[in-house]
Image: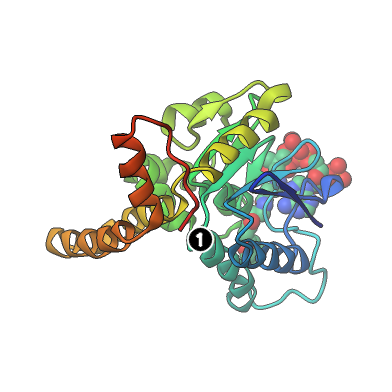
Amino acid sequence: MVLKEKREGVLLLTLNRPEKLNALTGALLEELYQALAEANQDPGVRAVLLTGAGRAFSAGQDLTEFGEEKPDYEAHLRRYNKVVAAMSGLEKPLVVAVNGPAAGAGMSLALWGDVRLAAPGATFTTAFVRIGLVPDSGMSFLLPRLVGLAKAQELLLLSPRLSAEEALALGLVHKVVPAERLMEEALALAQTLAQGPTRAYVLTRKLLLETYRLSLEEALGLEAILQGEAGRTLDHEEGVRAFREKRPPRFQGR
Ligand code: LHQ
């Protein structure tokens, strides 16, 4: 259900239920969580790339998963929240290649990418209210931060289906890439990040996510703490040395 492939420092994860538009089930979420946990453990993995198999990225929760035995959604969301915690706290940079429709929690997962590319055929719809639900998987947290409150209200309450170009204009994705080049370009980008100062990328994500709950004073304090941490990495030493020696740096992710 989640294909895993290592390619030169990048772990490529592919949501693989193409016949169901990669709709999310408890089992798929668990596999995704395990794959992210493995990425954290594996020093050979310096960046992660997430995409979907077939014509969709992910249609969100598989609406046929439960039948008559519908679980308590509050309990079911623990499975989602575990994945979101693993993505937002991933110790490697995360690139997402949105190859097709992303809906509901599928859209939420896409937005957790540090860098998000999309094919022209990608579409984005929050979908939750269409079936009488509220945003989840971090969508209520991330969407207003990415697009502002007014646009988030529109996207969540009216659930339009945005094209890749509209998503680009809103900042939901960073770049639209022709479909036939999407994976090539996403992989090249992930490999570039994989060769970079990956600790600094991850600490930067942490700072950006924290800004929303910190006062200026606290944010300055956290910057100092994390700069202290970054300043103790070999990558910082190497970056400065390479700058002095006028050569490209060789970062190791530590
Ligand atoms: C699907 C799905 C799907 C199953 C399309 N499941 N079959 C919720 C509940 C509880 C707790 C946890 O959190 C959540 C979070 C959520 O994610 S709620 C939101 C769930 N997702 C949706 O409501 C999205 C529903 N799907 C769509 O809006 C569209 O299908 C999208 C935009 C994904 C794709 O549109 P199209 O490209 O036009 O494809 P389609 O609509 O024709 O769908 C193709 C097939 O896929 C179709 O089946 P069929 O047998 O008719 O070919 C759909 O029924 C099936 N499918 N989404 N989530």
Name the spot of residue 107 as percent of width and height, x first.
58, 47
Write down the residue under mark 1.
91
102 lies above or below 210: above
16 lies above or below 249: below
Name the spot of residue 174 as percent of width and height, x first.
48, 32
The residue at 75%/58% (across/down) is 62
Q: Is residue 38 left or right of residue 160?
A: right
User: Splitting the image into 4 quarters, where does residue 41 fall?
Assistant: bottom right
Mark 1 residue element: loop
**Amino acid type of disc 1?**
Glu
The crowd level at tag 1 (other Cα within 10 Å; few <14, some 14-19, many 20+) is: many
The residue at 58%/76% (across/down) is 74
Residue pushed farthest right? Answer: 19
Q: Is residue 158 visible?
A: no
Q: Is residue 147 left or right of residue 55?
A: left
Name the spot of residue 10 as percent of width and height, x first.
64, 47
Return the residue nearer the eye: 175 or 120: 175
The quadrant of the rendering that contains the N terminus is bottom right
82 lies above or below 138: below
Return the residue nearer the eye: 46 or 80: 46
The residue at 60%/32% (across/down) is 118
Name the spot of residue 53 as percent of width and height, x first.
78, 42
The residue at 33%/51% (across/down) is 237
